[in-house]
Image (cartoon, rainbow, N blue to C red):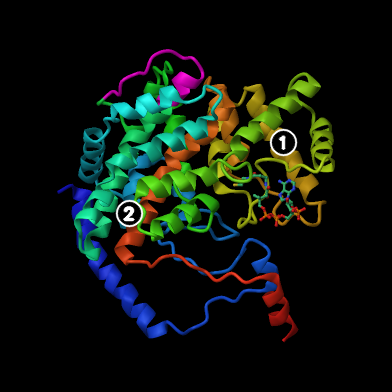
Amino acid sequence: MSLLKEKLAAILPEQVSSIKQFVAENGSKVVSEVTLAQAYGGMRGVKGLVCDTSEVPPQKGLIIRGFELSQLTDKLPEEILFLLLTGVLPSPAELKDLQNDLKEREEVPEYVWNVIDSMPESSHPMTYFNTAILVMQNESKFAKKYEEGINKSDYWVYTLEDALDIIAKVPAIAAYIYRKKFNKGARIESNKNFDWGKNYVHMLGFEDKEDKFANLMRLYLTVHTDHEGGNVSAFSAGTINSALSDLYYSLSGGLNGLAGPLHGLANQECLGWVLETMESFGGVPTEEQIEKMTWDTLNAGQVIPGYGHAVLRVTDPRFTAFHNFGKAHCANDPVFQTVDRVFKVVPEVLKQVEKIQNPWPNVDAGSGSLLYHFGLKEFSYYTVLFSVSRSIGIAAQSVIARAYGLPITRPKSLPTSKFKDLVSK
Ligand SMILES: CC(C)(COP(=O)(O)OP(=O)(O)OC[C@H]1O[C@@H](n2cnc3c(N)ncnc32)[C@H](O)[C@@H]1OP(=O)(O)O)[C@@H](O)C(=O)NCCC(=O)NCCS
């Protein structure tokens, strides 16, 4: 048994029984109420979901198992996976054991490559990626065991098996999609000596002798893992998971949500907006030029990608992590300089638009300029990078949900006529 599984087997029963007792003793207490505006407003702020892997306080931003993001930016994504699942960072031995376990699971079935090869070349990279995950459902250990008949208390064990199988394979799949879609040449085999993030850079095909891109990739993959349970991808995946659909189904479904421009696709949109601004003004624009471009975009009825958030009310600490990396490693890059200047101007403009709740940058505002700096310039690919990382968070949330035995998700909807009745009473 792997050290991760051993640890989970040791801690989960106690956690599960304490949650059962907590709910039994307090089940009737009111923790949230729903206004009409919330019912018609995407349920913003309604406290009706449980997520123990991470939380996003509006004034602080991402906290993973009690650690603020700034405390985790030097950690490997594999360490974050361990932290999300167990609540503690791994010891060196536990980290090595997890990395070895992932190495043993990384071989991708041949039919996945064939499916990718048979898709229309015009498919978006996210369509390739989510299709590849879905087609691998054939491998689900949870689905097989469920069919054979297993005890509910073992659901998490086989969901963990699926989680580790998927996490081990996604970098190779994502890297191949990049190479195929953008004509970069043949598939590159994994290097068994590299960690998860560095190996991804290697399989994408980038020369990276001093590990500079690998360091960005490790940060990128750490930062995007998890963002509590109510965001579109985590919530959708969790809902699908709650029907006991296996992780291949639920992850693919959740990541289809990440492919939306108001969610993960904003990183591709954001770099597009920055480059367009640079092109309009022939280089790094002045603050006045950025202000004009911002108003032009708003007046055209479009959003400024990378700004605003449904929950956050401060600068996203994930943006800050990338911004700090950029200041340290790409300070002279004109695209990064533009992003830096946009950060000075856009919030001041958005503050003047009354309806906008949060004028500050989110995770997607700066990451693209760093990828661009290292030569990953095909920005329609950026949401795949986000997805590789988010696979970790969604997988961890699914294992925990199975361990807790959370029931099928089923909030109540009402027609407008019923809401009118309720309000008139
Ligand atoms: C993230 C986002 C979807 C949150 O939406 P939300 O919770 O409804 O945000 P708000 O309550 O502040 O929205 C109120 C209004 O301000 C608008 N608004 C919010 N952020 C905006 C932005 N960056 N640019 C222009 N308008 C914005 C909304 O579209 C909405 O307008 P509407 O009432 O005409 O529909 C929104 O801020 C957005 O579209 N941002 C740009 C896309 C992006 O970066 N997404 C990645 C998020 S991590």
Q: What is the C-alpha distance between the residues marked 2 and 1?
A: 37 Å
Q: Position of residue 288 (x, y in %)?
A: 84, 33
Helix, strand or loop at label 2? It is helix
In magenta segment, residue 370: no
Res 327 visible: no
The residue type indicated by label 2 comes to Leu
Q: Residue at x 25, y 56 (%)?
A: 146
Q: For the C terminus, give its image quadrant.
A: bottom right
In the rendered image, the residue lying farthest to the bottom is 425
Which residue is pictured at 40% across the width and 34% down the height?
Answer: 132
Q: Nearer the viewer, residue 106 or 306?
A: 106
Residue 418 lies in quadrant: bottom right
Image coordinates for residue 67, horizontal then vertical, percent: 43, 55
Residue 311 visible in this rendered orientation of the protein: yes
**Closer to the eye: label 2 or 1:** 2
Q: Which percent across, then down, holds residue 235?
A: 49, 56
The disc, 2 or 1, on the residue closer to the chain's N-terminal end is: 2
On the rendered structure, is 425 left or right of 321?
right
Mark 2–mark 1 CB contact (< 8 Å): no
Q: Residue at x 41, y 50 (%)?
A: 250
Instruction: In this rendered view, identify the residue nearer to me: 411 or 9.
Output: 411
Residue tagged 1:
342
Q: How many marks?
A: 2
Residue 177 magenta = yes
Where residue 372 sits in the image (x, y, percent)? Answer: 57, 24
Q: Which residue is mark 2?
A: 85
Q: Nearer the viewer, residue 46 or 425?
A: 425
Type of residue at label 1?
Val
Q: Secondary structure at mark 1?
A: helix
Query: Magenta stretch?
Result: 175-191
